Amino acid sequence: MFTGIIERFGIVTEIIREGSNVHFILESNLALELKVDQSLAHDGVCLTVVKTDADSYQVTAVDETLKKTNLSTWVPGKKVNLERCMPANGRFDGHIVQGHVDQVATVKAISDQNGSWVFDFEYDADQGNVTVEKGSITVNGTSLTCFNSRPGGFSVAIIPYTYEHTNFHQLQVGDKVNLEFDIIGKYIKRILQGYGD
């Protein structure tokens, strides 16, 4: 489990295709602290560390992950938000994040607010995911509060610290981001809808 509080960056240095799988090699000063078989969130996508060395490590994405996330758009040089799993005795600074991306969204607008930034996102509402005003949302692994909540869209306000310490400073209009909707909201929605056949 994660909390959506980004620890460090990783830089994609190499992409290796093997059948339907893709191996990503990332450089990060977090590499020395990682071990094989550890879960690590990459822009909100939980991936397993399969190799490590002094300054880099490797993770593998299967076809299902590539279809449901923005990982298929990654290129060498891309800066990725990283978060290790929350320790059982750690502080819960964000919200419950599983590292299971629900769908991607598109950056529709970025507005400089002279000290902060407002990012507006749109996503396919037909997939049934919803946000609520002042509710939690995870964008590229970052725990945020959404506003202007509407079917298929929402906005977030980004403070300077978050802008500098996540890859929000690299996002541009038209970019794809990973979304994980609030797990509590997903359960409530499913209960209200019923399970059907």
Image (cartoon, rainbow, N blue to C red):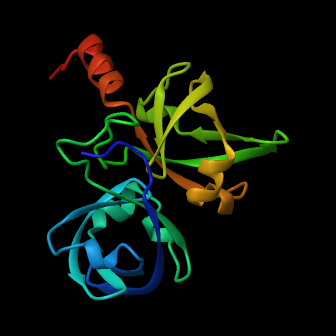
For residue 141, say whether it is visible.
yes
For residue 21, say whether it is visible.
no
Name which quarter of the figure residue 194 lies in.
top left
Name the one closer to the observer, 65 or 85.
85
- Give coordinates of residue 143: x percent, y percent: 46, 40
Tell me the quarter of the image containing the C terminus. top left
Q: In this image, 151 relative to 28: left or right?
A: right
Name the one closer to the observer, 33 or 73.
33
Residue 101 vertical placement versus 33 (above, below): above
Name the one closer to the observer, 148 or 22.
148
| Residue at 53% from the left image edge and 53% from the top image edge | 177
| Residue at 31% from the left image edge and 30% from the top image edge | 183
Residue 189 vertical placement versus 65 (above, below): above
- Give coordinates of residue 53: x percent, y percent: 27, 88
Q: In this image, 132 relative to 183: left or right?
A: right
- Give coordinates of residue 126: x percent, y percent: 47, 33
| Residue at 38% from the left image edge and 30% from the top image edge | 182
Residue 108 vertical placement versus 92 (above, below): below
Name the one closer to the observer, 96 or 173.
96
Counting every numbered tag in the picture gives: 0
